[in-house]
Amino acid sequence: MADLFFFLSFCIYLISWIGFIFYFKTLKKEALKYAQLVLLVGFCFHTLFWILKIYQIFTTSLLSFKHLLNFLSWELVFIYFLFTISPIKIYTTGFFLLPLVLIFFLLSFFFPQEVFSPFSPHFKSFWFPLHALTGLLSHGFLLFGVVTSLMYILQEREIKKKHLGLFFKKLPPLEYLDRVNEKCLYLGFIFLSFAMISGAIWSELAFGNYWRWSPKEVITLILWLIYAVLIHQRILIGWRGKKASYMFLLGFSIWLISFFVINLFSKGFHTYGS
Amino acid sequence: MDLDITILVIGLNHKTAPVEIREKLAFKNSSLHPLEKLKKEVSSFKEGLFLSTCNRVEFYFILERNQKNRFLTDFFSFIENESSFKWKDLEPHFYFLENEKAIKHLFEVACGLDSLVIGEPQILGQVKSAYKEALNYRTSGIVLNRLLHKCFSVAKKVRTETGIGGGAVSISYAAYRLAKKILGSLKDKVVLLVGAGEMAELACMHFVSEGVKKVLIANRTLSKAVELAEKFRGEAYSLDELLNALIKADIVISSTGAPNCIITKNMIASVLKPRKYKPLFVIDIAVPRDVDPEVNNLENVYLYDIDDLKSVVEKNLKEREKEATRAKTIIEAEVLKFQKWLKELGFYPTLRALNEKAEKLRQKELAKTFKKLKNLSEEEKEAIEILTRSLIQKLLYYPINFIKKSYHEEGKYAISLIRQIFELDEPFKEISDEDLNVLSCEIDKDIPSDSQNDSSKNFNSKKVLIQ
C-alpha cells in the first residue's frame, strides 16, 4: 500500500511540474491553478504514504536513510503550500522547487534499504523523534531558502546589468524573494536550535554526555553559526538580498557535506549503516 | 460569396495622411455629429459608424451592393463640403477597404495592431465609444452590431492570448514596472523627487496613481518644492537636506537641470547603513545626468538612466511586433467566422419566415381541433401540442436542410425556390378544406402507387378529427 502511494505521489508531482513549466512559459493563471491542484493531490498521497510509513517505522524500529530523503521532499512541498497561503506571492517557485523534490524522490527510491539509522533502538524515547523532526524541518527550510536565493541571484543579476531577460519577466519581485529568504532563515534557525538542544538532552539520557565533538556535531555547529551570524547581521546591519542569498548557498554546501558525506561515510556517532 | 451588402471602410490614419488633413476631418468643431449629418445628406447607406482618434479618421458603412457607386459620389461631395479640401487632393490619403479586408481592418484597429504604438489599449475604448455614438444616432443595425461585438471579443482574445499589450512602452511606465520588480508592492514605499520640474512630476504620476505611501520633493529653490509637495500631499526638502531625504526614500526620480552630478556615489554609500541596506531604485531621467553612474555598483542600489529605460522600451516594442504576427493569425480565423455568419445572414430571414408560417398554421389547426374536442384533459392537450410541434419540425427539416446545404452552390436560387414553394412572400392565406379536397383528388388520379393509400388514409383520419 505504501509503495503504491509512493509511486502515485511521484507521478503526480511529475505531472504538476510539467504544469509549472507551462505556467513558467506562459504565466497563465489557469496553468498555475491546475499545477497547484495536481500538486495538492500528490501531496495528499504523499502524506498518506508518510502516515503508513511512520507507523511502520515505529513498529519495526527501523529508520532507513532513504526515508529521510523522502521526508525532505515531503517537507519542501509542505513549505511551498505554507508560502502559497501566506500573503507573499511567489508562485513561479514551483518551477524551481519541484525538480529538487523529484531528485530527492528518485534518490530515496534508488537508495539501498539497508542503510539504517544507528539510533534504531532509541525510537521510543521522547527526545529522539523530536530531534529528528526538528532537524529535518530545519533542513527543509534551508533548502527552500536556497531555491529562492537562487531565484533572487538570477534575477538580481539581470536587473543590475540592465539586461532584462527571461528571469526578469517570469520571477516574482526581488523584495518578495528576499522576504521568503528571511522567513526561511528564521524558521530554519529556530528548528536547527531545537534539533541541537533536543539532541543534546537525548544524548545525555541515552549515552551520558551532552556533546562529544563528532564530525556531524561540529559541522552542524558551523551551520548554526552561519545562520546566527546571518541573522545578527540582518537585524543589526541589514544584510539582505544578494549577500544573504550567497550566505544561503554557503549554508547549502555545508549542509550537503553534513547530510550526505558525514551521515554516510564518516566513522562515528550519527553514521548510518554502520 | 453572394451577398446583397457590402462592408466598406473609408479612412485615413497616421501612416497615410499628415495631421493637417486628419484634424480637418475629425469633425471636432462642428456642432452636429458626422453620423447625424450623413444620415440627413447621404441616405444611400444602411448602417454607419464613425471612428475618430488622434491617429485616424475612419468611416464604416454597410451598403446595398448595387448602391455603392451612388453612395460614393454622395460621400465625396459630403466630404468636400465638410472640409475645405478638394476631393482630388484628399483621395490619395484615403484608403478604401471592402468586405473581408474591411472586417480584418476593424479587428486590427481594435487590437491596436494599426496603432502608432503597437498594442496600445486606449483604441479599444475609442472603438467602443464610437459604437455607442452609432447606437445613439441609430445608424447601427444588424450587421454592425454583430461586427462590433465580434470585434470586442476578438480584441479581448488577442489581448489574453498574445503578449501584444505586454511590456512597458513608455519611459515612465517602464520605470514603474522596474520599481515593482525590485520593491514588490509599492503601497508602503516612499518616492523622492529630486528637482521639481514637469518631467519629475510626469514620471511620478504612475507611482502616485498606484498609491505609494509618501512623496518627498527636494529642489534647489525650496518654494517650488513646497508647491509641488502640496499637490502630492508630500514633504518638501531643499537640496542641502538631500541626504536626509535619501535615507527615507525607496525610489528616487531625479530630473534637475544641473550641469553635473547631484547625487554622487559617496552620498549614496553614506546613506546605505542608516537605510539598513534596504533596496533603493534610482531613476535618472535628466540630461546631463544627475546621478553618478558608479552608484549602480553599490549593494542593493539599482540605477537606471534615461538611455537604460529607453533600451528597455525599445526591446519591449520589438517583442510586441513579434506578438503582432500571432495576433494576426487569430484575427484571420475570426474574420473567417464572421464571414460565415454573413453568409448565413443571407438565408436567415427565409428560415424565420418558414418557421413562422408553419407555427401560424399549427396554431390555427390546433385551435380548430380543441374547439371540437372539448373534453380533453390537460395532459391530452399537451400530448397533441407536442405531436403537432414535432410533426412540423420534422417536415421543415427538409427545406431548411436544403437551403443550408445548397446555399453555397446555388446561392439565392435555393432561397427563392423555398420562398416560392411555401408562398413566403405572399400574405398569409387560410387553406380551406376545398383546396385540400381538390388536391387530394388530383393525387388519387395521378399517382397510383403505395403512397397513395397512405396519403388518403391520412386525409381520412384528418377529416375524422375535424368532423
Image (spheres, coloured by chain):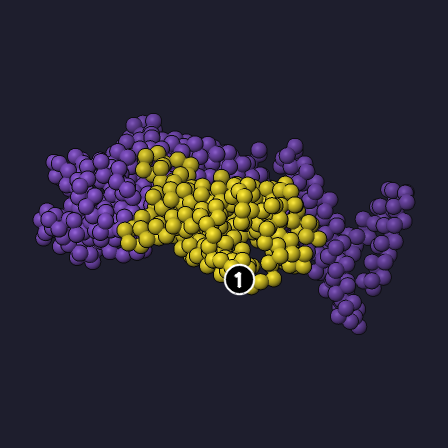
Chain colours: A yellow, B purple
Give residue B338's position: percent from left, percent from top: 54, 40
Give residue A200's position: percent from left, percent from top: 48, 58
User: Which residue is at 85% across, 50% downward?
Assistant: B455
Depth check: give the residue in front, A262 or B304: A262
Depth check: give the residue in front, B87 or B456: B87
Asked whether, in this view, residue A132 is left or right of residue A188, the answer is right
Asked whether, in this view, residue B86 is left or right of residue A4, the answer is left
User: Which residue is at 21% across, 43% downward?
Assistant: B269
Depth check: give the residue in front, B305 or B430: B305
Q: Amino acid at mark 1?
A: Leu
Q: Looking at the image, which residue sits at the far front?
A: A208
Depth check: give the residue in front, A102 or B230: A102
User: Which residue is at 73% across, 53% downward?
Assistant: B392
Q: Up-down: is A34 above or below B5?
A: below
Q: Up-down: is B178 above or below A81?
A: above
Q: Is there any visible trace of residue B368 in the rendered image?
A: no
**Figure quadrant of residue B59:** top left
Asked whether, in this view, residue A6 is left or right of residue A156, the answer is right
Give residue A9's position: percent from left, percent from top: 62, 49
**Figure quadrant of residue A163:** top left
Please tell me whether mark 1 sits on a helix, a strand or a loop: helix
Q: Is there any visible trace of residue B415 in the rendered image?
A: yes
- Crowdedness of circle 1 by 10 Å Cα count: few (<14), some, many (20+)? few
Query: Which residue is tagged 1?
Result: A205
The chain under label 1 reads A
Instruction: Count numbered badges in the picture.
Output: 1
User: Which residue is at 43% across, 32% downward?
Assistant: B322
Q: Up-down: is A82 above or below A147?
A: below
Asked whether, in this view, residue B467 is left or right of residue A12, the answer is right
Give residue B221's position: percent from left, percent from top: 9, 49
User: Which quadrant of the figure contains the C terminus of chain A?
Assistant: top right
